[in-house]
Image: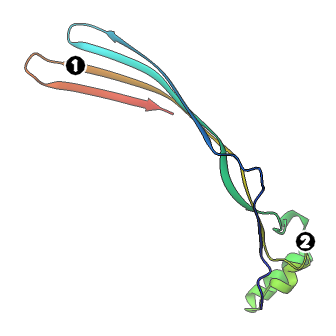
Amino acid sequence: LPSSTLAAVPLDLRNPVSMQFSLDGQQAIVANWVGEIGYHGTRVVHLPINYNINQVRLDSLTAAQRAEITAAIAAGQDTTPIIDGFRPYPGFNSINLFAHVASSNYHSLQVKVDHRSSHGLNLLASYTFS
């Protein structure tokens, strides 16, 4: 049988854009102790995603329709003929749309304390809250 799955790629795809920003400050606390605090962030836009626009919405099915699908699964039957009638575009299994519409954000507060002893030993403690 021929495949009944389609894939669509828009003509106006954009490249992902990544922006990184940070601000750090460092201060001597007492002799041989240095503290540092900083904010670091990243924002990415136009990330690629692939989603099925012909997926059956579960909230659109009645209890009787769900029971019919469940019974077919329990009997080991193919559910494609049952589910196909509930799809937005009957006759096609999946219609996958590729788009650059997702985004991502990251924010963090970073704290670091450094002790430098005169004997060549260092103590470093750091913490990141994100």
Quadrant of image for the N terminus: bottom right
Above or below for 130 versus 70: above
Quarter of the rendering containing residue 59? bottom right
- Which residue is at a point 25% across and 7% down the rendered structure image? 30
Q: CA distance from mark 2 to mark 1?
A: 66 Å
Residue, x 76% and y 83% (percent of image)?
A: 3
View extreme (front): residue: 11
Residue holding disc 1: 115
Q: Amino acid at mark 2?
A: Tyr
Look at mark 2 in the image and give the residue it sits on.
Answer: 89
Q: Which mark is residue 55?
A: none
Depth check, front residue: 45 or 79: 45
Where is residue 33? Give x, y as percent. Answer: 25, 13
Give the image quarter of residue 9.
bottom right
- Relative height, residue 107 to residue 46 (above, below): above
- Decide if residue 121 is on the left or right side of residue 37: left
Q: Secondary structure at mark 1?
A: strand
Residue 116 percent location from the top left of the image: 18, 18
Give the SS element for disc 2. Answer: loop
Q: How many marks?
A: 2
Q: Position of residue 45 (x, y in %)?
A: 66, 40
- Percent x, y of residue 48: 66, 52
Q: Earlier in the sequence, mark 2 or mark 1?
A: 2
Side (left or right) of 101 relative to 26: right
Q: Amino acid at mark 1?
A: His
For the point 37% across and 18% down, the residue is 36
**Which callout, 2 or 1, points to the residue nearer the camera?**
2
